[in-house]
Amino acid sequence: QVQLVESGGGLVQAGGSLRLSCAASGNIFSIDAMGWYRKAPGKQRELVAAITAGGSTNYAESVKGRCTITTSRDNDKNTVYLQMNSLKPEDTAVYYCNADTTVLYKSWAYWGQGTQVTVSS
């Protein structure tokens, strides 16, 4: 199993920046990719950015050029960061960390508890 602990959300003015962090522990060697999703009121959950174990990244069109996803690993934790710049009110949402894993040829997805990001105009 993988445990995810998120941090870094908050209230920021439009044009400002935030950095979200998600620390994964447990069976981190089973992780194929980690990413950030968001869910705004009245909207479906959407992918914001993802990074594979090999370092390939993927971004939603709405955040390209404004967000950067990176990852770091120490002995027992794999941490993924989402640096968000030039934030807009439409970025307001609950942001969820995700880890996709494969164990014994089966895929499992793990989710963090969510962190609120509010961008004021």
Image (cartoon, helix red, strand yellow):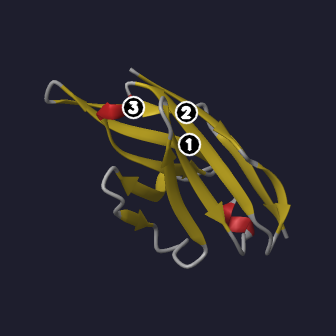
Label 2 sits on residue:
112
Sequence-earlier tag: 1 or 3: 3
> Which of label 1 and label 3 is nearer to you?
3
Rendered residue at 51%/58% (across/down)? 70
Which residue is at the front of the view, 89 or 60? Answer: 60
Q: Is residue 74 left or right of residue 10?
A: left
Looking at the rendered image, the quarter that the N terminus falls into is top left
Q: Position of residue 50 (x, y in %)?
A: 42, 56
Rendered residue at 37%/25% (across/down)? 27
Give the amino acid type for the residue marked by disc 2 in the picture.
Answer: Gly
In the rendered structure, are the residues bearing label 1 and label 3 in contact, judged by CB atoms less than 8 Å apart?
A: no
On the image, which quarter does residue 15 sit in?
bottom right
Rendered residue at 41%/39% (across/down)? 99
Q: Position of residue 58 (x, y in %)?
A: 39, 65
Q: CA distance from mark 2 to mark 1?
A: 6 Å
Find residue 96 and name its label.
1
Rendered residue at 46%/67% (across/down)? 60
Give the amino acid type for the residue marked by disc 1 in the picture.
Answer: Tyr
Q: Is residue 2 left or right of residue 102?
A: right
Label 3 sits on residue:
28
